[in-house]
Image (tube, rainbow, N blue to C red):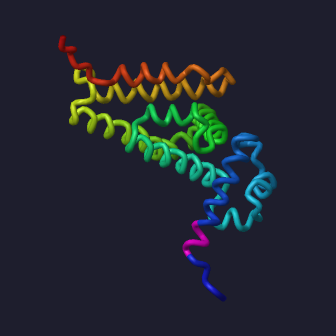
Amino acid sequence: MPRVSQDHLDARRRQILDGSRVCFARYGYEGATVRRLEEATGLSRGAIFHHFRDKESLFLALAEDDALRMADVVAEQGLVQVMRDLLAGGDHPADWLGTRLEVSRRLRTDPEFRGRWAERSEQLTTATRLRLLRQREAGNLRDDVDVDVLTAFLELVLEGLVSHLAMGLPAAGLGPVLDLVEETVRRHRPSRG
């Protein structure tokens, strides 16, 4: 029997995650039945569950994938850029938003899920905190507020933006709001004149 290459396995896993993202966003966790997951991914249940132990493992992998993508953006450009990408309709914004809302719902209602998710949610906080520390060392970040407070501030703004978008409120005109958020964490140098 021929062995399947790692590239093929990785591509298949990506296909499952991308299709599942759409399915979970459209139907929520409970409504994403195995049949719907099969339709969304174009694969059989055997192929899906060869890569993921069960539906919860698949959902956690998807949420973790989204968190890793966000952490990469944060490391390079900051958490405000993640928010700008949401407004601009970047990488799967509606699907990402659906997954994010489903994570929030399950965190409120499922203690076991909350425990499993806690391990993964720290990635974004860590990436944000490290980015802010680098910015402080470079002299670009205000130094009168603790980095942990600034991290919590930016995470709260992100959650507020997610709620705003989830309610279907308009995204137009929020760019200047994000400019203000960015300006709030920057170091202000006295003007010379």
Extreme residue in the left direction: 192
Q: Residue at x 44, y 23 (%)?
A: 179
Q: Main secondary structure of the magenta part?
A: helix
Residue 99 colored magenta?
no
Q: Quadrant of the N terminus?
A: bottom right
Extreme residue in the bottom direction: 1
From this viewpoint, is residue 96 visible?
A: yes
Left or right of residue 6, residue 181 in this image: left
Image coordinates of residue 25 in percent, x first then y, are 70, 41
Range shown magenta: 6-10
Left or right of residue 70, residue 146 in this image: left
Image coordinates of residue 4 in percent, x first then y, are 61, 79
For this rendering, which residue is in front, 21 or 172?
Answer: 172
From this viewpoint, is residue 106 visible?
A: no
Question: Quadrant of residue 107 in the image?
Answer: top right
Left or right of residue 83, residue 29 in this image: right
Left or right of residue 104, residue 115 in this image: left
Image coordinates of residue 166 in percent, x first then y, are 65, 27
